Image (tube, grey):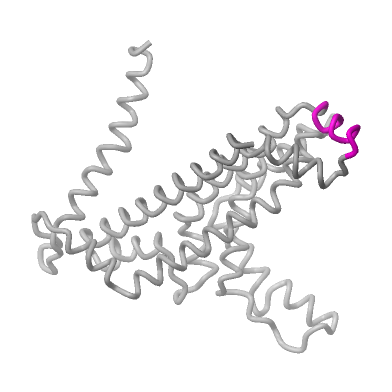
Amino acid sequence: MAALLLPATLLVLGLLVAPMAMLFRISLNRYDAAQMMQEALTAENYLRALADPYYREVMATTLGVALSSTLLALLIGFPAAYWLARMESRWKSLATILTLFPLLVGNVVRAAGWMALLGRDGAINAALIGTGLIAEPLPMLYTTGAVIAGILAVVAPYMILTLAAVIEAIPRSVEEAAANLGAGPLTSFRRVVLPLALPGVAAGCVLVFILCMNAYATPVLLGGPQFKMMAPAVYDQFVRGTNWPFGAALAFLLLIVTLVLTILGSTILAGRSRSR
């Protein structure tokens, strides 16, 4: 059995662990404008990132967008997942394919579509002005709301499909029994469906939160140059500033925060699921 795990283990070590170890080593070096970096073993890059109010604000913005997007994905995705899981029509396969369809479009192309919708001369403003609801275009593009909407369009299919797989495994007889005992639809959902679906909620929220924390193309295109999240900030340090040690430190801080919050959230949801 151990021999069967060897190829996958070597692949993970070669493609994930080794590059991350190299990146961590780079984060301990010093930046040098002439040589790009000097060999060292110092934590000054991490201390600088933690002490700088700008990067604390960038991290706070990233957390706010990620948590908001995850919560909205859960609120929007749960009804869609329930409908998909309980669907018995021959069109269920088509509905599943349509749910997956947004994932076939690249993030840049999708963000460009949102720019065409949300711009000052975009379709939404043109429709509102044409119907007389507004006199001047609304500033929808390059806002936090535009970024959250763009990210939500990316992560919603992941949430829906993850929840649908868990809800589909919940027997219908459990809900029917609750109805026979006098429970209404909302009570049945709160007391029966939701507790049994908590493992799917945990898995979907973890997956979506990780994707949101590391979003790059959507914040850059829909947020504009003034809107900063951690992934674009890391890219700027590597490519524009050529400060690899500091960029690597920012990348590891993003990784640490994401892992800590993911483990904390998973533990809380798992504990609630066991208690129920």
Instruction: Determine the image quadrant of residue 30.
Output: bottom left
Q: Which residue shows up at 81% across the image and 28% down it?
A: 172
x, y (%) of residue 264?
Answer: 46, 47
Residue 177 placement, left or right of 9? right
Residue that extends furthest to the bottom in the rendered view of this protein? 135
Q: Which residue shows up at 60% across the image and 49% down it?
A: 105
x, y (%) of residue 158?
Answer: 60, 43
Q: Which residue shows up at 76% across the image and 32% down it?
A: 93
Q: Is residue 257 magenta?
A: no
Q: Is residue 71 above or below residue 220?
A: above
Quadrant of the snapshot with the N terminus: top left
Residue 15 placement, left or right of 214? left
In the image, 274 versus 81, the foreground residue is 274
Residue that extends furthest to the left in the rendered view of this protein? 39
User: Range of the magenta residues?
Assistant: 173-182
Counting every numbered tag in the picture gives 0
Quadrant of the snapshot with the C terminus: top right
Q: Is residue 109 above or below residue 9?
A: below
Q: Is residue 33 above or below residue 38?
A: below
Instruction: Determine the image quadrant of residue 103.
Output: top right
Instruction: Determine the image quadrant of residue 56.
Output: bottom left
Residue 169 placement, left or right of 260? right
x, y (%) of residue 19?
Answer: 26, 42
x, y (%) of residue 233?
Answer: 36, 65
In the image, 93 versus 273, the foreground residue is 273
Secondary structure mostly seen in magenta is helix
In the image, 146 versus 94, the foreground residue is 146
Q: Which residue shows up at 73% across the image and 30% down it?
A: 168
